Amino acid sequence: MKITFPDGNIKEYPDNSTGLDIAKSISEGLARNAVGVLVNGEGYDLNRPINADCNLRILTFDNEEGKQIYWHSSAHLMAEALQQLYPGIKFGIGPAIENGFYYDVDLPDDIKITPDDLVKIENKMLELTKTNSDYVREEVEWEDAIKHWRDEVKDEYKTELLEGFQGQQISFYKHGSFTDLCRGAHLPNTSLIKAVKLLSIAGAYWRGDSNRKMMTRIYGISFPKKKMLDDYIQMREEAEKRDHRKLGKELELFMLTPNVGGGLPTWLPNGTIIRRIIEDFIRKEHIKRGYKEVITPHLGNLNLYKTSGHYPYYADSQYPPIVIDDEEYLLKPMNCPHHHQIYLNSPHSYKDLPLRLFENGTVYRYEQSGELSGMIRVRGFTQDDAHIYCTVEQLKDEIKSVVEIIHYLFKTFGMADAIQTRLSFRDNEKDKYGGDITLWNKAQKEITEAAEELGLNFVIAEGEAAFYGPKIDFIIKDAIGRKWQLGTVQVDYVMPERFQLEYIGSDNSAHRPVIIHRAPLGSMERFMAILIEHYAGNFPFWLAPIQVSILPIGSNQHDYANAIYEKLDALGFRTYVDTRNEKINRKIAESEQKKIPFALIIGQKEMDNNTLSVREHTKGDIGTKTQAEIIDLFTDLIVNKK
């Protein structure tokens, strides 16, 4: 059989060779580090025979797909430990997630797992790794599988999962004393799991349905080396210090209260200052690039979203319709149908295009209470949303322009050094998508060509497209290495058809425009959370809600301090004067706690010399400066967004 590797090389191997055989043929080191293979994009165990020509990629823990195999295998190992420690336990699902794994379990009524039990479960997992048990795949007929789980094991959860696969080939995975219903792939052996940490316990409804049973969800993570685990724990500890919920409260940036409603954040004055600075910055950049700002209502007629397809495609994540004067309205889940109405408000010629409409638009999505998370996941949020209506000939240039502004924004916020690019395409599940497949293929081809021409280092993710078109997603790393999916660019041939959008071409005939949907920052709420954690609350000077604290040592310096305040305030700097009868060390400490970028200390010497003693947050004393030098420094930090 012919095996094609990612670099395009093709080699022949005997039929039924395994991924491990192929890895060994390349190097023993690769074989030792391999955790699985991708065969035509499907995960295979290393010891699973391959019997046809294919594209093959060997995975290690360094690959995202390799981590998924490693962590999914660890979830099975945890399940075996739980089964041995808690007889009578039943198992729901145990997937790998972005960082680690979890398993949803149903415990007997007389058993409860608490955080104190996690170390005991970890120790049992490490004990089981020493048994060197192989992960063994067994393929069975559906009838035999349902008999096993329904009649023999009497596990209603696995039985229910199987009902969705009737008539399909089913696979079990066994290791040690544990058997699971699973598609795979898995590690060759439990001994490859070297370091384990169980992180937390939570409640989770079976299959995410609040009307179903509440199960116990146990989260964990594992690594092939203890140092990797130590580094991860250190990163988590740093993340806890940076937690936007904690810092948001300490710095008085926002609040979340049940009196307003779950997932509905209220921006406090300090947070509002930062938000308005970001919005003004983005607004100016867009206007500079030819965008026209619009404002649309917070709700719309239900028929608008039926036309767009957002209803019923996203019905589960929308609030119920509101009946007004015998008509049904929906809290706005998306801005785009409103922007399409703006396009339809007047006729268009090819000479008018591209038309770029921009809005900081607030939308509302229903999230289950268990899924809400600070400002990261909320029910009401504001998107830096825009829609570009262009001709097919203009499409690539418009995509390139959008990518340029996204990179510029991330660079400005100090996040440009670690951008990853993902092309999110459709898969073969036709019911998930709207529109003509030929237009989809055309859009995917054009996105790929644009990404190649821009020199983007991208991966393709099938099944991650929006229902109306493929997209380019940008994933950034924050200051402590965590990944966040932020900017997105989506090409849409579907909505122009649904809304009958037209322009008159140079041939005097009607044509359909192409739409680009794009939101560089995503949502203001989520971006604010990421920004707080990225900077650990130490906002750069241009963003800080209070930029300068003026700290007179004694009452004799109050007049001079107030004169400095008035001068800086008149120049637009956000300044605070602390004239309390407190010791200067206390004032400095409180300025540091508030993370104010600069403190200007004024004693008798500074007043006599018409100077200022300057402290920079986290750095300490940076010397004495004249008023002119201070103003030049602050102006440079604002103008260049340093």
Image: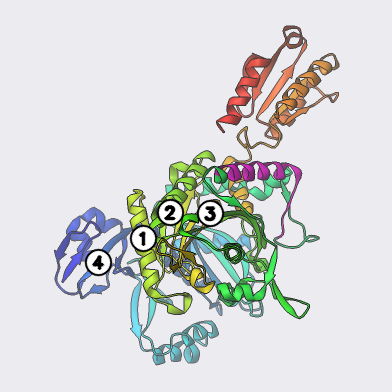
Residue sitting farthest toward the front? 508
Is 457 situated above or below 580?
below
Magenta segment boundaries in residue numbering: 264-285
Earlier-in-chain disc, 2 versus 3: 3
Q: Which mark is residue 356?
A: 3
Q: Amino acid at mark 4?
A: Asn
Is residue 198 in view? yes
Q: Quadrant of residue 627?
A: top right
Q: Which residue is mark 2?
A: 399
Q: Secondary structure at mark 1?
A: helix
Is 271 magenta? The answer is yes
Earlier-in-chain disc, 3 versus 1: 3
* Circles 2, 3 touching at the beta carbon (< 8 Å): no
Q: Which residue is mark 4?
A: 55
Q: Which residue is mark 1?
A: 446
Earlier-in-chain disc, 4 versus 3: 4
Q: Amino acid at mark 1?
A: Glu
What kind of secondary structure does the magenta stretch mostly adopt?
Answer: helix
Q: Quadrant of residue 67?
A: bottom left
Q: Secondary structure at mark 3?
A: strand
Q: Residues within 10 Å of mark 1 (few under 14, many from 20)?
A: some
Is 574 situated above or below 55?
above
Q: Is residue 84 left or right of residue 528?
A: left
Q: Residue at x 53, y 51 (%)?
A: 520
Q: Residue at x 49, y 40 (%)?
A: 411
